[in-house]
Image: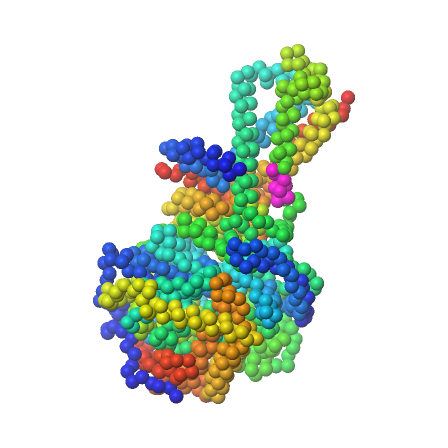
Amino acid sequence: MSGDTLTLTLRIWRQNGPNEAGGFREYRLSGVSTHMSFLEMLDVLNEQLIESGEEPVAFDHDCREGICGMCSLMINGQAHGPDKATTTCQLHMRQFADGDTITIEPWRATAFPVVRDLVTDRSAFDRIISAGGYVSVNTGNAPDGNSIPVPGHQQEKAMDAAACIGCGACVAACKNASASLFVSAKVSQLAILPQGSQERTSRVLDMVNQMDEEGFGHCTNTYECEAACPVEVSVSNIARMNREYIRASIVAGE
Amino acid sequence: MDLLCKICSWPACLLARLPGIGPIVKMCFTSIGQKILMALTGLALVGFLVTHLAGNLLLFKGEEQFNTYAENLHSLGGALVVAEVGLFGAFAVHMCLAISTTAMSRRARKSSYAEQQSKRDDVILGGGGASRFMLITGVLIGAFLVLHVADMKFNLRDKLGITQFEHGDEESGNLYLHVRQVLRDPVTRVVYLVALLGLGIHLSHGISSAAQTLGLHHRRWNVLIRGGGMLLAWAIALGFLSIWVLGFLK
Amino acid sequence: MVHIASEPLNSRVPEGAIETLWDKHRFNMKLVNPANKRKFKVIVVGTGLAGGSAAASLGELGYEVDAFCFQDSPRRAHSIAAQGGINAAKNYPNDGDSIWRLFYDTVKGGDYRAREANVYRLAQVSSNIIDQCVAQGVPFAREYGGTLANRSFGGAQVSRTFYCRGQTGQQLLLGAYQALMRQAQLGKVNIYARREMLELIVVDGVARGIVVRNLTTGQLETHTADAVVLCTGGYGNVYYLSTNAKGCNVTAAWRCHKRGAYFANPCYTQIHPTCIPVSGDYQSKLTLMSESLRNDGRVWVPKDSSDKRPPSEIPESDRDYYLERRYPSFGNLVPRDVASRASKERCDAGYGVGDTGLAVYLDFADAIRRDGEDTVRKKYGNLFHMYHKITAEDPYKSPMRIYPAVHYTMGGLWVDYHLMSNLPGLFVLGEANFSDHGANRLGASALMQGLSDGYFVIPYTIGDHLAKADLPPVPEDHPACVEAVQAAESRINRLLSVGGRRTVDSFHRELGQIMWDNCGMARSREGLESAVGQIQDLRDQFWTDVRVLGGQETLNQSLEKAGRVADFMEFAELLATDALNREESCGGHFREEHQTSEGEAQRNDEDFSYAAAWEFHGVGEDPTLHKEPLTFENVPPTTRSYK
């Protein structure tokens, strides 16, 4: 772990507003420490841009510890960059070499319109959750926690799906811009747990319906989503969603 | 394309209101429903391919066996017509859905990336590689089918005087000799080779993809499902290719 | 000079035995009839655990709710990053826990600077929170047989912490978020994402609305309501480097303070002992390693300060497990303030490890030897993974290097027993208020407080206000609304027109350094006085030399940051003033002048057993101190000992 520094060429997508045309602009940045995170590297770039009188690059970020799901970025054609199981905020510059050219683009999907530069609007995900991604229980109605036993292995499976951070990398990486992994993670979590089973029929139908309405593509079954997912949500959830969907279509209206 | 979808959706809307089967009809017009139909029709077509291949391998047994098989098949009469219509139906549905889902995914990403790279480890050998060619291989297979049915069922090229096949006559013809002759034709050789390779690629993604769409996914069995799909795909393609080789034999 | 108000603050704690207070009070509070609830509109600012749960619960009750957050979705609030767990007095492990013990531990952990009645209520409803979350589908860790699992946390000798791997905050927040989105679907809650609150609208002394900036379009929007519920988190980012998210800020709370709400105990800041150390000047935030790691990790430094061998080569006999040495009964699980100060003490004495000498080891070798790597991976896998990602070192093979970092702020807007500030109609929940943790918060109690406030307190207390207050309609063109919008607008224009040379971040970093050096883990009169001067100078520089590019009508992240840093510049002075005023050491507030011969915090109960609530009179003007006397009838104050 020496104090290596890099000189980089950054090709960054700049776009002033949702309805304006965008394009790439190139910046050279030197003295980038390999210990920096990718977003810290962009911070340094932005400081320099402001000093030179150019508006800084807008990008979404918040917790910078890989859990809030706010950061995004297509880095050299890969969602969240080259490192697996990592969000952009946890990606470190030691993954890059001196002299590299790095292309940085926003998530691209019709359902995620660009707001500015690298910032996109992912409210489609909120609307999908609104459509049915919950257990309908009002505050104060709950029985004792231990009155609903959940076997350890089942809970683990639900937790694997529940780990989704809603960043949208699955959509970004899919050649069809499909939201199947995101939707299936919530459908699965609640289908596996006994608490969610009461509403499993309407939930999957409503959520899939909303997913289609938002304009996401259909699943390619190529599993790029799983490979890009920073928390490694498995495509087995998509298979489970499909099963839930078939079942729901048959029994709905009973 | 959008207009086409809209026109198609009219009868669907009416059907979806039907009591009982409403939700199922509705399902056929959602992203997942379309994939499910695609998977079902695809698997039906795979089933056909397997039986078709089994029958055709009789070509290696000799003239008599093959012609007897063909005669038996034709003696089924009405049942055969039903099967053929079913087959054609499955094919038509599969094709229409291919167009509709492709249109959907194009709409889902109107502006494309300047650069895109896979993050999968197994991108060359895995299903991911083949999936990119589903539409083009599908079109190839479709084109092949036109020629194949024209030659084998209707002997059209002969009738239209494009190429002479002397054994193609339906009443007095000898199907075994007709097949051998068609296979020797240079146009056939090129089209069949390309289409069969396309078929292998198409199925190498298609079969395991259909399994996933239908919800068949299990940590322990995935290797079997994906490997088996791949194996079956190339077994079918190579099986048919062996018949293509027959065209070069005396 | 500090002006001291002559009247003590009235916390509206009802009379009676502490066990019965909340039950009786719920009966005594006025109700809003179900059919009338829909006639009342409530604004909830912030969608973390407190805000999300409050907005969802109020929507369920039938109120019209408008919920605001500055992130792109309510699901991203920083509660999501809480790792370790949530406390509840369920006593499932049968190890002697009870409501009374959780109450006792929390009051003691807060170093006797919290309001007893609030803490007791918190302990009482803690069990309901777990039940509610389980019912929502939060995947809490389970035993093989299917019952809920517990682990232990700092400052307690029972296992009462419920958890979802190292992502408890995420799962609880998603539970609240989903409940919120359900209300959005039902039309009871309107979600306003990417909105930043810039002003509080006060009409005839009552909080009646807010002004927000739509961060995408730049438009200033006026929203009026019958009550405002502020759930905007803590102010840890005044130190620039903290474990808070980059967007966390004091702006909403500070603007309420400037409109008359008292700010209480700003000097109570929590420095968390187990964070990944700073690696360079570009560093933008610090990453926490959950306190739960201290269940199995052992903290040590070399016995010899000149020992530069790699940790694996230092034999047991040459290691100083200083927490186990100094605090034999709690060992590595002492509360956060104690653990942080102990590592600072070792590093200041020259025993620190790593390139900077500002780190100590957190070693899992014993746990791995005892339980196997798989067990350790199952408990802490995601934390080890995160450490590995950030430092490129494998904690399964060599010990983690950790150092304290700013994590949580116990201070906040002053609230009474109803969680209402001194401004009627302004309720403050979660980390944004000051109420439950005193001078130090115990691990796994922040999640508990946020959800308790949102699910089980505000639904009752807000009704009492709405039923009693006289609330004439406030149109958008009301003079108070117009004035608030103008105030927000002129501030934005002022920021955009400075046209100086320095970036907002450079000011923020400098402010953070001043705060960390003088108002951090150890404070002295001299340091604090110099800090006040430095802050004032920096603030003047900021307003003459900051450079904010771009305009107001678009997404402008520099402008957002500039507004927040401008508020931190004003707030920082209050923090230092409060720290100067409190001539004692308690919890997270450690004054070097007030320590025992062993270097432990020395409280002064005679003079400082009160909550210090500050009233604003203008930037650079001396604030007025309002005291809320704290009495401890149920947990008599003793010298906090974890030995």
Please say if C281 is above or below A96: below
Q: Nearer the viewer, residue C432 or C554?
A: C554
Q: Residue at x 65, y 69 (%)?
A: A33
Quadrant in which residue A50 is drawn: bottom right
Residue B74, placed above or below residue C550: above
Along the horizontal axis of the image, is C317 left or right of A209? right
* Residue C63, image x, y percentages: 30, 58
Looking at the image, which is closer to me, B30 or C595? B30
Question: Residue at horizontal 27%, vertical 73%?
Answer: C12
Residue A199, position as x, y percentages in the image: 38, 46
Instruction: Determine the residue positioned at 58% across, 39% down.
Output: B208
Camera-nearest residue between C342 and C480:
C480
Q: Quadrant of residue B163?
A: top right
For residue B11, above or below residue B118 = above
Percent from the top left, x then y, of residue A202?
A: 39, 44
Res. C641 in view: no
Q: Is residue A132 visible?
A: yes
Whether residue C510 appears in magenta in the rendering, the answer is no
Q: Which residues are magenta?
A: B127-135
- What is the residue that sits farthest to the top in this orientation? B172
Q: Position of residue C544 (x, y in %)?
A: 51, 78
